[in-house]
Structures are given as C-alpha cells and as structure tokens.
Amino acid sequence: MVKICTANEAVKDISEGMCIMIGGFLGVGTPEGLVQALVDKGTKNLTVITNDSAFPGVGVGKLQDSKQMSTLYTSYIGGHPESGRCMEEGDLKIILTPQGTLAEQIRAGGSGLGGILTPTGVGTVVEEGKTQIVVADKTYLLEEPLKADVALLKAYKADCHGNLIYRFSARNFNPLMAMAARTVIVEVEEIVEAGAIEPDNVITPGIFVDLLVKGR
C-alpha cells in the first residue's frame, strides 16, 4: 500500500537545490496543498519544471511570490508579473519552451528516451545552443529529456494502492510527470479502498506513486 500522510510530512525531505516537477495548467490540476506546504517549509534554490508560473497566490505562483525558485522550465509566464521582471533582471533563470515540446521532454524523461526531435523552434531564438539534426531533408531540434527528483501532482481520486484517476482538464501534465520523477507525491480529493476504481479507468498505475495526501 502507498503511504498516506499530511502535506507537511510529504514535503519534509525536499531540500535546497532539488529539481521539482509540479502538475497543473494555470492553477487547474495543481496540488495547492502541497505547494503551500513547500512554501511554508521555505526551501530555496529549487529548479521547477511546470507548464506555467500561474498567477500571484495561485499554484506555482506561490513559489514565485516567495522567491524559492532559482531555475524555472516552463512554457508561459504571462500570468505572473514577477516572473517576467525576475527574468529580465536576472533574479530567476527561466527556460521558456513551447508547450508541446515541454510535454514531450517530460514524456521522454519518463520513458527512458534520449530526447525528442521536433521542428518547433527551428529558425527562431528557440534553436540557440541546441543540436540540429536533418532527417529526410527536414531540420529538427534535439530536445533533451527532463527528469526530476520529486513530482508534486494532483489527481481526483486514488485507491489505497496509489492508482489514480483525473477529472477533465485537471489531468494535463500530471500523468506525464508521474513517470519522470524519482519520488512522486500526489494530492487527491478522495481516497478509496482497493478495487473501488475500475481497472480500465486507472490513468496512472500505483507503481509510480510514493505518497498520497488527502486534499480538496
């Protein structure tokens, strides 16, 4: 059985300098309780991989507010004014990546692949410093896989073995990140007994999940 604990207990081993993946899309499908616990813990110098920096006081935006990140891999920072300011002033290293490419980099990390080839970004500033490979007369960028020490995720429901199902668009990056981190911590709205979730409905198998936190 997967260990069930509080949010504070779940993040206690996250230390300075770690790489963290956080699920969500502009706050939807983000583990708000786990992010808040990390803010309360005050761990600094974090590398965060996430779709966006959300908004002030929302999701990953809380880590922006508290200045706990040193590096941010993301596809969008327009919702949080501080993200752009910090990038311009050099207070936060931000690696902006097209959303689809970011998702595939995470998928590659979870699948054990050496990277992905994508035409997205060829001929733009995105290609700077990246390896270009020509296949069948078409130029691609080699994007390296992304992995993390810890993933903080949100799911709708879990059974006591950690099998997960998601609700609508709150699914987003969460299933991909569950495969790409060494330790996976999931905040769920409901925890049920084994067998209560139909096997065909399971999106993330419990083998990927280490800790469950009952949230909202």
Image (spheres, rainbow, N blue to C red):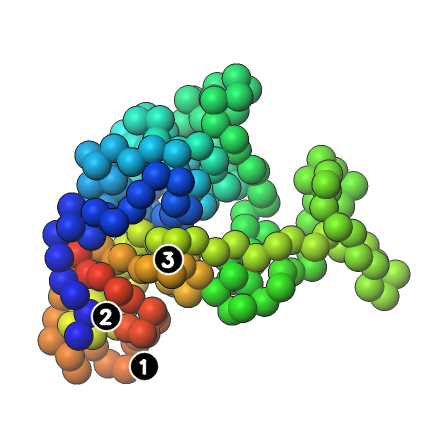
Q: Pick whichever, 58 or 68, lies toward us.
A: 68
Residue matched to label 2: 162
Describe residue 28's horizontal placement relative to residue 41 as left or right: right
- The residue to which callout 3 is attached is 174
Q: Which residue occupies 25% across, 49% down?
A: 13
Q: Residue 105's spot in the image, x, y percent?
A: 56, 56
- Residue at the image position 47 percent from the left and 37 percent from the top: 72
Residue 211 image offset from top left, x and y in percent? 22, 61
Residue type pointed to by label 3: Asn
Q: Which residue matches tag 1?
A: 200
From mark 1 to mark 3, how far is it between C-alphas? 18 Å
Q: Could you say which disc has been placed on residue 158 in the image?
A: none
Total numbered labels placed on residues in the image: 3
Expressed as whole percent of the image width and height from the top left, the position of residue 188 reads: 20, 58
> What's the CA distance linking mark 2 and mark 3?
14 Å
The one of 181 and 139 positioned closer to us in this rendering: 181
Mark 3: give few (<14), some (14-19) or many (20+) Cα within 10 Å: many
| Vertical comparison of 4 with 63: above or below | below
Give the left or right position of residue 150, taking residue 138 as reference. left
* Earlier sequence position, callout 1 versus callout 3: 3
Earlier residue among tags 2 and 1:
2
Number of other residues with Cα within 10 Å of mark 1, as a class: few under 14, some 14 to 19, many 20 or more: few
Instruction: Report the front residue among 154 and 185.
Output: 185
**Mark 3 secondary-structure assignment:** helix
Question: Residue at point 29% right, 63% down?
Answer: 166
Tell me if residue 147 comes above or below residue 85 in the rendering. below
Q: Are marks 1 and 3 in contact (CB under 8 Å)?
A: no
- Residue that appears at 35% across and 54% down: 151
